[in-house]
Amino acid sequence: MVGARALAGLAAALAACAACASPDGNLIKNPGFEEGGSPPTAWFADPGLAPKGTVTLQASPFRLGRLALRLAPTAANSDTNKPLAIGQAIPAAAFRGKQLYLAGSLQSTGGATAVVAVFAISGSGAMAASASIMRGAGTQGTARLEDVFQVPDAAGAEQLIFLCAVNGTSGTALFDDVVLSTQVPKRFAAARADPGPPLPVKVEVDAGKALRTIPRTLYGINTEWTWNGNGIWDESAGRLDPSLVGLTRDLGAGQIRFPGGTFSDYYHWRDGLGPQSARPWQPGLPGEGKSRHVLGTDEILDFAGRAGSRMLFTANVGTGTAAEAADWVRYVRAKRERPAGVDWWEIGNEVYVNDGSPASDPITMDPAKYAAKCAEFAVAMRRANPAIRIGAISDQNYWFQSYKEWDKAVLTAAGPHIDFVAVHNAYAPMVISDGGRSVRDVYRSLLAAPELVRRNLAKLAAEIGALKPADAKRIKIAVTEWGTLYHVQPSSRFVDHCKTLGSAIYTASVMKAFIDNPSVEAAHYFKLVDQLFIGVVGKRGDAFAPTASYYALQLYTRHFGARQVACRTTSPTYDSRPNGWVPAVSGVPLFETLCSLSADGKTLYLMAINKHFDRAMKASIALRGFRAGGSATAWTLNGTGIDANTGTAPKQIPGITWAKQAEDEVNPRFARGGPGEVTLTSKRVRLAGSALQYTFPAHSVTVLEVQR
């Protein structure tokens, strides 16, 4: 919210306001603004910022004292590098290498975002480190927010700049009882010093009670046609990228979805045929930059065949026709000699989205129109190949719906023509305005979201079950897009957290929710590769590399059995606060398990997901219908901390600045990303009999492969 270019001037201007610690450790003078003044006593307001808004005091809504600071921005407050703010300066030498407690009571109204921030800067004004808490535009009421700031242990950190600031061009931001203190609350210090002994959990496995055969189509992945398929096609070498072929094969992707998400409803498949040099350049979405159709039907079929995957194609219902879709089915059917079979076809993507955006406006349609088009497409496509499986789209999710009773209209009219419904109900946490929340607070919501996905899938299954018996029996569920998604703007301090260990734990937990629901027959993580922030494969330097969620999926595809069996777990729970798209959730299990058998019944697989940030879980495992013979392998996905990552990084694009990403306040690892920070390891362990003991490490996903 304040750029490095603005800090040098701030440092000089604030030098006269240097503070000293109060008896309670607070380095900020007049923190509650009770001493009055204009600007408030001990605070500096840059006269050059006067056109950006007003700085006043008003009656406090926080019940902490008489007065609160009020910042009211104007239309001139558009530069987030130098917003309307007041501040204080503190010499940093005494605090180098130490942690300081950052807190404040904040309220925002209208379009304003209230920000309390601290920066460690050098004598030249260069930023060495920063931390902030924010109350975003559109949030209701007041909030007490807090964080911990690590002061760099370097002589270059000469001053700490503390600011109360407002982003936005309208509304107001209120502040009271702001703190930058040498006294870090005990709850922070205690968690760092000793997380405590392992927590006890109980697991009961009934290997004789089969629940379902797990379809390989649950382990699907999304790809897109634009920008050479985000690197799938190596244009310089004129071939599929061999490293991505290998990574996809090693991932064990059961099905590949193509040609994209929203791109699908602007995609005309014939543009991807013929000599690549003669194919057209087109935008993926209205108003976007153009790319050539070098990754077309033949190329993606070849890619899937080499990777050992099957295919799901999304037909263009937004700007295409039923005849066009049927011709695509015929074309693909003629390619059946290719290694990749094509069985699944989805009619449209998210045409139920009606948000006024340039991408949705040309293709959105009400449920009656979509249902009629879906039936028309399905009939034409089925004539082209009677063996295919056809899906309609459902708007079922736990965060928004643009049209009322979409599912009722679509299932009633199109139900007799379809084999599955496609949903996108497992994105989380989407912290559009994170409000300055800590990493742990956001991740608690992230790891609670699988409970909401579970409920939402049950609701959709019940809707299908209420159809005519023949339709209810035939129609299944496919989650054709899902995954971690924090934000879509580079300015977000969470946008790149899709790659962390915490996100991988979410990935494992959501996959468990899919397997637990027998109506769910396919799922496709979004997406395989992305040179920005969202793929399970990213770029580390010039090479493609797996992210943490890649390894979570690989545990399922390579180290889990084909037959799910019953498993019950008794675990400690927690309650999460609302964050982004995820409302508050109560009673979230900290420890989850899922069990399966190999096809020959000789190996039991017990997957355990430990969501606790700091503490291990000591499990007492009771086996029925299976006796461990003593030989076992433990495969464990873990890392150095909840925000650890493998070091992939978004592509650096001229004109785009990626925000400094938030880090765990207890054990910050995000900025240290690299190959050794997240690992998938195996070790031999001895487990014998029908009563087992095993300790699962904190923030981990483990599969025990137990032999009879």
Image (cartoon, rainbow, N blue to C red):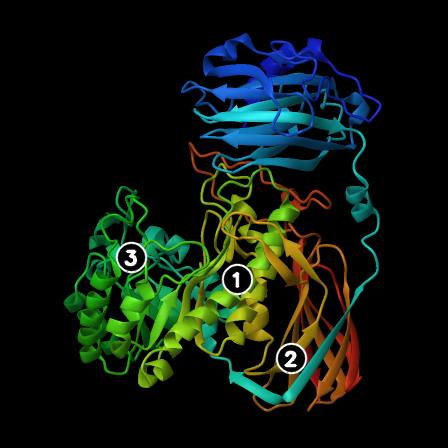
Which of the numbered marks, if any, corresponds to residue 351? 3
Residue 566: quadrant of the picture: bottom right
Residue 288: quadrant of the picture: top left
Quadrant showing the C terminus:
bottom right
In percent of the image, x 43 and y 74: which residue is there? 461
Quadrant showing the N terminus:
top right
Q: Which one is earlier in the sequence, the residue at label 3 or at label 2?
A: 3
Task: Tell me, yes or no, if residue 673 can be seen here.
Answer: no
- Where does residue 340 sit, x and y in percent of width and height? 36, 75
In percent of the image, x 32 and y 62: which residue is there? 405
On screen, residue 417 versus residue 74, left or right, reads left
The vertical placement of 2 against 431, above or below, is above
On screen, residue 14 versus residue 110, left or right, reads right
Residue highlighted by disc 1? 452
**Mark 3 surroundings within 10 Å by alpha-carbon count, few (fewer than 14), some (14 through 19), many (20 or more):** many
Q: Secondary structure at mark 1?
A: helix
Q: Secondary structure at mark 3?
A: loop
Residue at mark 3 to residue at mark 1: CA–CA distance: 23 Å
Q: Amino acid at mark 1?
A: Leu
Q: Amino acid at mark 2?
A: Cys
Residue at mark 3 to residue at mark 2: CA–CA distance: 39 Å
Task: Tell me, yes or no, if residue 433 can be seen here.
Answer: yes
- Where does residue 169 sit, x and y in percent of width and height? 43, 24
Which of the numbered marks, if any, corresponds to residue 567? 2
Q: Find out whether the residues at labels 2 and 1 contact each other: C-beta distance under 8 Å.
A: no
